[in-house]
Structures are given as structure tokens and as C-alpha cells.
Amino acid sequence: MRWAASSWHTLRGRGAAFRNLSPAERRIILVAGVAFPLVAVSLRVWGLSRVQQALLRRPLHRLLGPARSLDRSCIAGLVETAARTGLRKANCLERSLVLMWVLHSLGSATELRLGAKREAEALLFHAWLEQEGIVINDEPDIAAQYAVFDGAFLPQGMRFV
């Protein structure tokens, strides 16, 4: 990526950093920024399975066409930046779903992984994306830190960290 993450901390820095992005990079930030609140509400109303299916049925080919030249790690970084700098910070499930949607729209298949672990008295849930067994939007060893669910099993009331 061509910008410093620290420049996103101030409003002036965000504007300057945004202007320095290519048009394709700006599109990804804008699309992700709009998608995060929509995905958050949709998850609460329809649940994971329906939201995931809906996103995969509605690719963003027209909006993201120029972004085909960007590599996967750049796209993941742009989506992560949009997740951290929006009005409401997106959780890991929302970030993973939006990144899955963007990558799918650009012709890149990914797998959503869900995991859980017990920490003190709490049960923590986490979501991330993998492509051909490689973690895209998290630490490379994240699967070793969580018990990974097989399939799309989500208990009622599950909250992601």
C-alpha cells in the first residue's frame, strides 16, 4: 500500500491519504464504507447464511472493475482501513463478509472461517477469510488459536470480537 496507516488518524490526514490513492483503491474504500453498516443491519435481521448468500449472488462488477489490477493483500488492507475509519467500527464477521464480497466481485473465491475459544470466563468468537488455505485478513496462525467450526454453524446470540 502506498499510504501510511498513521495518516488515517486525523481528518486532514485521512483526506490527504484518500486523495493519494488510485481511483481503484478509492472505490474499494468507498464501497466497503457503505457496505459495512448494511452488512451489520442485515446480519441482525436475516442472519449469516442469508447475508452470505445474498452477497455472493450480487457481485459488484461495475463498481469494482478497475480494482482488478490490485493484489489481494492491498484489497484486504483497504477494506480493513474502511472498517476502522467508519462511523462505527466493523467487527471481524462484518469485515470478513465485506472483503469476501469485494474479492468475489473481482473473481477471487474465498472461504469464510468461524472459530471460538474460551478466555477466562468468556467464550470468544472470531471470523476470518482463507483462500486456498492461506489466511487473508488476519494473522497467519489464527486458525490455531480458535476451534474452527465446520460449515456455517452459528449458535443464537453469537457475538464476534
Image (cartoon, helix red, strand yellow):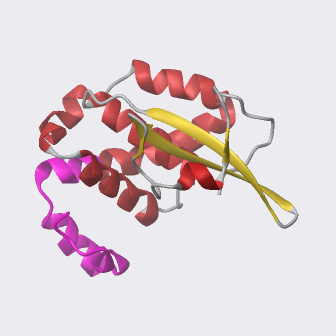
Direction from residue 24 to residue 132 in the image, left or right: right
Q: Is residue 88 magenta?
A: no
Give the quarter of the image for residue 31: top left
- The picture places residue 39, in percent across and down from the top left corner, at 52, 39
Direction from residue 24 to residue 85 in the image, left or right: right
Total labels drawn: 0
Tell me the residue at 42%/23% (across/down).
Answer: 56
Tell me the residue at 39%/51% (across/down).
Answer: 33
Tell me the residue at 36%/61% (across/down).
Answer: 81
Foreground pick, 150 / 28: 150
> Compared to 61, does 21 lie above or below?
below
- The picture places residue 105, in percent across and down from the top left corner, at 30, 29
Foreground pick, 57 / 154: 154
* Quadrant of the snapshot with the C terminus: bottom right
Magenta residues (range): 1-28
Pick out the residue farthest to the right: 121
Tell me the residue at 48%/39% (across/down).
Answer: 97
Secondary structure of the magenta portion, mostly? helix
Q: Is residue 8 magenta?
A: yes
- The picture places residue 27, in percent across and down from the top left corner, at 22, 47
* Quadrant of the snapshot with the N terminus: bottom left
- The picture places residue 135, in percent across and down from the top left corner, at 43, 47
